[in-house]
Amino acid sequence: MRIISILTFVLFFSCFSIHAEDGSALWLRYPTGAKAIIMNKKQSPTLNIAVSELRNFWQGGIPITLEIQKNKELRALGNDGYIIRASKDGKHLTITSSGEQGILYGAYHLLRLQATGQLSESTLKSLNVSEKPDYRIRVLNHWDNLDGTIERGYAGHSLWKWDELPSVVSPRYEAYARANASIGINATVINNVNASPEILSDDYLQKVKVLADIFRPYGLKIYLSINFSSPAALGGLSTSDPLDKEVIAWWKKKAKDIYSLIPDFGGFLVKANSEGQPGPCDYGRTHAEGANILADVLKPYHGIVMWRAFVYSPTDSDRAKQAYLEFEPLDGKFRDNVIVQIKNGPIDFQPREPFSPLFGAMKKTAVMPEFQITQEYLGFSNHLAFLAPMWKECLDSDTYMQGEGSTIARVTDGSLFPHPLTAIAGVANIGDDPNWCGHPFAQANWYAFGRLAWKHSLSSEQIGEEWLRQTFLPVIDAQANLLTAKVVQKEKEQLFSQLSLLNSQVLQKSREAVVDYMMPLGLHHIFAWGHHYGPEPWCDIPGARPDWMPSYYHRADSLGIGFDRSSTGSNAAGQYHSPLCEELDNVDTCPENLLLWFHHASWNHQMKSGRTLWAEMCHAYDRGVKEVRNFQKVWDTMEPYIDSERFQEVRHRLKIQSRDAVWWRDACLLYFGQFSKQPIPYELERPVHELKDMMEYQLDITNFECPLYGFTK
Amino acid sequence: MRIISILTFVLFFSCFSIHAEDGSALWLRYPTGAKAIIMNKKQSPTLNIAVSELRNFWQGGIPITLEIQKNKELRALGNDGYIIRASKDGKHLTITSSGEQGILYGAYHLLRLQATGQLSESTLKSLNVSEKPDYRIRVLNHWDNLDGTIERGYAGHSLWKWDELPSVVSPRYEAYARANASIGINATVINNVNASPEILSDDYLQKVKVLADIFRPYGLKIYLSINFSSPAALGGLSTSDPLDKEVIAWWKKKAKDIYSLIPDFGGFLVKANSEGQPGPCDYGRTHAEGANILADVLKPYHGIVMWRAFVYSPTDSDRAKQAYLEFEPLDGKFRDNVIVQIKNGPIDFQPREPFSPLFGAMKKTAVMPEFQITQEYLGFSNHLAFLAPMWKECLDSDTYMQGEGSTIARVTDGSLFPHPLTAIAGVANIGDDPNWCGHPFAQANWYAFGRLAWKHSLSSEQIGEEWLRQTFLPVIDAQANLLTAKVVQKEKEQLFSQLSLLNSQVLQKSREAVVDYMMPLGLHHIFAWGHHYGPEPWCDIPGARPDWMPSYYHRADSLGIGFDRSSTGSNAAGQYHSPLCEELDNVDTCPENLLLWFHHASWNHQMKSGRTLWAEMCHAYDRGVKEVRNFQKVWDTMEPYIDSERFQEVRHRLKIQSRDAVWWRDACLLYFGQFSKQPIPYELERPVHELKDMMEYQLDITNFECPLYGFTK
């Protein structure tokens, strides 16, 4: 039996190739060789894509009809929604939608079912899918600068080759649009929120237009980040005061110019009065006044403004409270084509934060979550961290704003407050690396963001499973599949079971592992100065902003550790709705994974495990290290199943992650141990370096690995 | 109860001081404050030392009489032996010996019993100790060069300050003699076996005389390593041919000069025709002819020659066989004041070797074991490796030369072959570092060598326990002891139990851990070129001697790994006596810890554990890493019991060892895995670097740590 199993296994892989893959195909590794019958009456660029994708890749063996219908059922699903149904005799499929875009999304849905092995003869015969997206706008934010660099980008340079545009067009622009369409992303802000005024120049708009034309058939709308002082900086006006008539006129003219080039232009994303960016407050105006003037000029064209709530300044007020203090009073003062974009947490994309209290607090204003796909604070593209669990944690958080069940998902998807404008943003992790995202597993986060933006009730497990199967199953061409279907069934199941293991043991645990080895129990922002990669809880830059210092956040002293945000401290807990605020306020009821976010807890604070806080912290750091070592073990078992190129690449990065986890553990436990004055529990693995040696290294943004822990050559 | 326990604990340590210690006191940390009555009739420098040591440090409360007696019982124990007995009423102790030296050794014995807590009121009353050494000459070999460097020394520069001598005398010379006397070492070769002819110059002999005068009262005789070509190189003769008359005359004159300065001079140690050193073979003479001429000139003065059997050359013959092939035929050809000094194993002080087949093979010649105390191949002074288990393993090995029970101990101590000349040598690990040996635990190896040279039946456990107690128990002064004896009893027991843990969990396991993470299963000499510290199984220096290349030793290929020294290979196994040679010759009966020494075994060779050879090797490397991590844990539990200075020092070095263990594991498993083409078993921790990155580093002798694995700042 064993020999037969090995033989068929060999056959499976020799027929179906574990050839080297560079990751450039993303999750869209459809085999060629299909010859499907696809019927479609209407012609349009979008419909043509749907037809072509199915003709090329549909292996189901039965014909498909694509049809735009305007019946009630379909109208309820909107232009993006669709229905996929088998005919009663099971010999025919139909994809219907009230819009072209829905047809294309339906086609990708079907191909996804096929690629993830969810279509058997019987499921195919009874197929009945009905889908509509939870958010109207599902948008990527690219923090790409016009000079080709990417702020917090770890996958090469910008995909947009501004020097070459508009004349030279990279084939990757269309590949990018296709990938987004395949997971339902319908919007993209292609330039950094720290925006250059230059993006609105005529030259650049000509370049943007080329991209917009390429993206359009895929249903991907372009948006731009704008610099609030563009009227002065680019237009030569003496001011950019949003209530100034000339300024208004300038923006009107600019909108007209844009829409003449890009009739379906999406609108503006604005970072104003934040981290040095200009904004309405420079002229004594409010954020609402600033946003509204832009909203007014875009309104005639159905454009919108996404206005970021990420504001803070080095005042006495707890940074975690500032966005709420500034924006909550403005509730109801924004135009209906403004949506306030709020980062998931009140600080800045830390491995774990509580949700921002602005969610739900602004009832009369449309608000949208901003997630970060790029791993600025989660190990760049060196660490494997699947972020769906983090985003789910935020979306599923209960704000209690309209009683129990007022989750952030419901606060933002239009079901709790009936704003017609709904959106969700993800800061992209895409660059010009051949595999798009640097770490082969970083693609999973792009994928997961798209899937959750479409349907926030999807489980992280399902998304992980989908992505793994599409990304790592050998590509089986249609002919071979028919010939050897029976032979390969068993091996396919073995593969699926391996991938499930990878999903449950690695993907699903990876974000929590990062929290454990970097900042467990509510610790946050103890990164090294500037680079947000390695640990520097001791960081102290003379003269630097105190709210950019780790000690501002961890506040370790001889008594304990953590930021007192309870009612005895900054009372940031008070910004949450009852009963959550009381729960957070009390050191004994505050969730332990946020304990040090809300409390300065004693080193001997009793934890639910029975351990002291100090011992619990040590165990968490140790657990993080052990988890990553386990990721390495599980990954290595994948070697027989995966092409060598991606296998080696992931293995290599897991080694870095494993070393970094030890570095984090050692640095934090040795540093905080100086305050706790307690030994690391003796059952745990000990540090392998001296704190003083670690503290001597100045890590800069281009050289962020600690040579003491072994660097990457 | 808990509070009381803590209080008495605090009292214990506050009274009795965990003050910083630099390790300079070695195991001789006797408290001051004793006022003992010591009676002694005869005066002599040696006896005066015994009296003074006891007067200063004896806390037993009862008087002691020292007495030289020539009765039959004492004569049987020799000049070095002694008896310690309590009087019948238990109110008085007597130390007797037939010689002064025995009295001094007896005094140290008593102080050792005291310092290790082995004397209670009752044991004291019935004390009855009778001791004699197993070897006549218990000698240290210093590989100290005249320029102050030490070959394979890792504890600073030479203790001997040749520039200052003879006029300036360091107090450390006497401290050195005292330390040796305290453990029974009675001989020292103070210069490198790769000897400079200069050591025999009149100038240097004047310096040596000063040391000899200081050492003499402690019973420590001086020997010198000589360069065989001294007659030519120093004496200006045209040859150093040992059968040349002028050469003989030169040596005679030199001997006379030496003995006129140092009447009790011990004799010569000679490394001849080995690794580039000159020797009799340069003139067509045998080793015996060379040794005998020196023996003849020393004979009138009762001097001896220790002639090293460490010879090999880059011929086709297996290096492991060469010493046997050269020396065994010379058996019976040496003078009776020549002793052939044989390294424990046939290659060169590897972490594990089989014993040298010369032991027992030379029946008519006195032979002595040469052990290496300095950790040339066991992590320098960075790694904690207690070597008593290694030396015991050699001494207890059965050569079968006179049937079962013909252990190396019995082959060399005069009990199996009745040679009156018996000796045992240890290559010293002593330098001018304040703590003498570099690693605080390296002192334990000096101590262990002395104790085993005295009594080879001592267990490694006992020696470890003795050393730990003397080295780490707080120094309790006599007055305080009497006042608080009851209070401290419990805490003392707690300390003893901690030290026992340290002994069993760290000391006793440490050498096997090094074997595991460096060269398990009989692997040997896969060190990096030149420095003998890190791993370089891949090392390949174009044009270098093949027998200095790791691949000469490991012979890894696609089929398996190991050096075939069975009858199908070099047949080095055939140099051993039956039934051992048959046992070693058969891959299925060869002890697994020497498997790859004697066999080129298949990667899938079935091991006793049920694992394949490859899997077993992986498990061994992994076990080594785990062991060192456990050493760290156990050591950290010592923090409350030990002065901070030594605690931190050991902790620091264990961190290095922990990193190095991972480095060794990764390098060897990744390298050998290329041949086995099998994955590391998935239950084991994975490597954290890439082989190719490791292979890129050229590690030199001054910079031997691999930066990839984190170096010492």
Image (spheres, coloured by chain):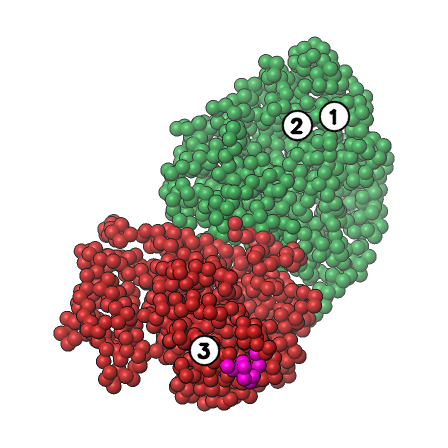
Chain colours: A red, B green
Task: Same chain for labels 2 and 1? Say yes or no.
Answer: yes
What residue would you read off at disc 3?
Answer: A255
Residue B706 drawn at (x, y percent): 57, 46
Q: What residue is at 44 percent from the left and 42 percent from the top?
A: B672
Asked if residue B434 lies left or right of residue A529, the reply is right
Q: Chain of mark 1?
A: B
Q: Amino acid at mark 1?
A: Ile
Disc 1 crowd rating (10 Å Cα; few below 14, some 14-19, many 20+) is: many
Q: Which region is colored magenta?
A: A240-249
Quarter of the image where one finds residue A614: bottom right
Residue B194 is tagged as 2
Marks 2 and 1, how far apart in space? 11 Å
Badge 1 marks a residue whose secondary structure is helix
Residue at far left of view: A89
What residue would you read off at disc 1?
Answer: B199
Quarter of the image where one finds residue B697: top right
Q: First in sequence: mark 2 or mark 1?
A: 2
Please name whichever residue, A147 or B158, is drawn nearer the observer in this view of the structure: A147
Say above or below: A208 vs B92.
Answer: below
